[in-house]
Image: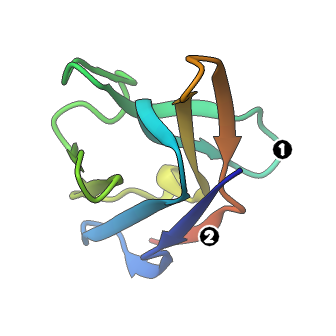
Amino acid sequence: QVQLVESGGGLVEAGGSLRLSCVAVGSAFSIDRMGWYRQAPGKQRELVAVISSGGEITSADSVKGRFTISRDIVKKTVSVQRNGLKPGDTAVYYCHAGVRTVTWVYMEYWGKGTLVTVSS
């Protein structure tokens, strides 16, 4: 069993910055991919950015140039530094991890979500 613990949400003015972090807690697993999704009020959950075990990054066009994702393989953490925040970035941000068990079974986990509100 893997638990994802998120931190760093809150209220920020437009143009400001926030850093979200997530740590995967548990035993006997390795990270295959890890990243962030978000869900704005009345909208579907969407990709923000994810990073694979090989370091490949996939990110939404809407955040390119403003959001930077990074990871620590040993500590099993992923962070996203978000600059130039806009009111449209207001959403609940969810940490996501795809992991491999010791028997190489792929499993996915979600964090509980952290609210980010960007005021205009």
* Nearest the eye: 14 or 33: 33
Against 113, residue 99 (above or below) is above
Say which quadrant the C terminus sits in: bottom left
Residue 112 picture location, percent across and down: 72, 62
Label located before the other in sequence (2 or 1): 1
Element on which disc 2 rests? strand
- Badge 2: few (under 14), some or many (20 or more) residues near its Cα, within 10 Å? some
Residue on which the image places disc 1: 42
Type of the residue with mark 2: Leu
Against 100, residue 7 (above or below) is below
Type of the residue with mark 1: Gly
Q: Horizontal placement of 80 versus 70: left or right? A: right
Against 62, residue 112 (above or below) is below
Residue on which the image places disc 2: 115
Report which quarter residue 42 is drawn in.
top right
C-alpha separation, residue under disc 2 versus residue under disc 1: 14 Å
